[in-house]
Image (cartoon, helix red, strand yellow):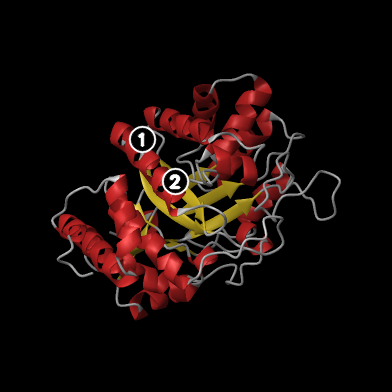
């Protein structure tokens, strides 16, 4: 196949493809044809820019009421290695990097039934007080649902309380794969795919932007993947609230699923079809912490425009055996992006110019 293939021509002409056309591409297009089409889309949007963020991850607890088959991060309360940070420890963690110009604090954790509602509000308030200019991207839809159910609150109430306490945006975790049958195999205790979508729709209505994800490379099919992408695209048509899509490569270590994980070709095909199908979601991330730096670099040629950020002490993927660094310096990020043939562009959580750079202009 080459660019004379009708669906490829449609993409090059800037037109939307259907779910069936996306599956046709998967069945018949080579990884190079997909990459060519997706690169054309990302270049039309951003030229040679590749975005990155100076961010800090905070995983405040690994205690979790769920037992997702693919997760190696979570622990039970009395299990060896279980931890929960106190608010004082959260404060200490954020203060320990005050000398760094961090633009984003990324906060997610397990579903710890011992934590009170005020713990979450106080954590946000402490982080906001210490980092008044940084964006706080915190708590997956799964965490929002857990708290809403535990305290008998609406999604709107939880999200409004969090926004009042300092929340700027939601990360995209917890989506996994929307297929109900697959969720029964992967994460039967977790909220349904529809509830995940409902929570993100509520956030968008409250002017809280969010990210979105898909966990791929385990036991799902391409049909499952495309149905997931189409559900995201439909919601984005309705609300316009998604900032970025992150295809998360399944990490095969230390969990009960025992799947192989995606190989390089599968990773690049996933990046490319994401950029092609999600024509209304602005950004596609090549998440180096899960994919590896080399794959993320090449992912920029297959439709991705974002490289994520410095991270520092990423725990969730590494618990499942990710062999990537736990963090990168700003200089390293810039070198990796430049050596890939792209122009580094520092951003905040909203893909706006870094607050640190805005302060200098």
In-front residue for pair 131/164: 164
Instruction: Check disc 1 and report its element: helix, strand or loop.
Output: helix
Q: Quadrant of residue 266?
A: bottom left
Up/down of 182 relative to 313, above or below: above
Residue 358 position within the rendered picture, expressed as x and y whole percent measured from the top left: 32, 55
Residue shown at 39% from the left, 58% from the top: 356
Instruction: Check disc 2 and report its element: helix, strand or loop.
Output: strand
Tell me the quadrant of the picture where the N terminus can be found. bottom left
Q: Which residue is mark 2?
A: 212
In-front residue for pair 337/8: 8
**Dot 1, crowdedness within 10 Å: few (<14), some or many (≥20)?**
some
Q: Is residue 358 visible?
A: no
Q: Which residue is mark 1?
A: 235
Residue 318 position within the rendered picture, expressed as x and y whole percent measured from the top left: 64, 64
Q: Are marks 1 and 2 in contact (CB under 8 Å)?
A: no
Residue shown at 58% from the left, 37% from the top: 142
């Amino acid at each position: 196949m080459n660019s004379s293939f009708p669906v490829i021509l449609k993409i090059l002409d800037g037109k939307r493809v259907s779910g069936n056309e996306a599956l046709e591409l998967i069945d018949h297009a080579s990884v190079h044809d997909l990459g060519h089409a997706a690169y054309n889309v990302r270049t039309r949007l951003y030229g040679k820019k590749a975005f990155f963020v100076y961010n800090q991850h905070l995983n405040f607890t690994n205690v979790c009421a769920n037992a997702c088959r693919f997760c190696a991060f979570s622990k039970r309360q009395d299990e060896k290695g279980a931890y929960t940070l106190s608010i004082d420890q959260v404060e200490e963690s954020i203060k320990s990097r005050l000398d760094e110009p961090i633009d984003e604090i990324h906060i997610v954790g397990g579903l710890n039934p011992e934590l009170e509602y005020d713990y979450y509000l106080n954590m946000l308030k402490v982080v906001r007080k210490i980092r008044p200019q940084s964006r706080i991207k915190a708590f997956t839809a799964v965490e929002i649902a857990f708290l809403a159910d535990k305290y008998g609150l609406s999604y709107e109430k939880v999200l409004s309380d969090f926004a009042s306490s300092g929340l700027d945006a939601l990360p995209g975790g917890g989506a996994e794969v929307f297929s109900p049958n697959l969720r029964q195999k992967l994460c039967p205790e977790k909220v349904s795919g529809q509830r995940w979508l409902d929570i993100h729709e509520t956030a968008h209505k409250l002017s809280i932007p969010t990210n979105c994800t898909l966990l791929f490379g385990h036991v799902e099919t391409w049909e499952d993947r495309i149905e997931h992408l189409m559900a995201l695209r439909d919601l984005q048509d309705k609300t316009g609230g998604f900032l970025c899509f992150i295809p998360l490569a399944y990490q095969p270590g230390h969990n009960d699923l025992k799947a192989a994980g995606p190989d390089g070709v599968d990773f690049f095909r996933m990046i490319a079809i994401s950029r092609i199908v999600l024509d209304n979601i602005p950004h596609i991330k090549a998440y180096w912490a899960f994919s590896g730096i080399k794959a993320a670099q090449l992912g920029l040629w297959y439709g991705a425009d974002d490289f994520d950020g410095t991270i520092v002490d990423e725990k969730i993927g590494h618990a499942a055996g990710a062999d990537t660094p736990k963090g990168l310096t700003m200089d390293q990020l810039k070198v990796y992006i430049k050596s890939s043939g792209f122009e580094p562009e520092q951003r905040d959580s909203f893909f706006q110019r870094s607050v640190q750079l805005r302060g200098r202009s």
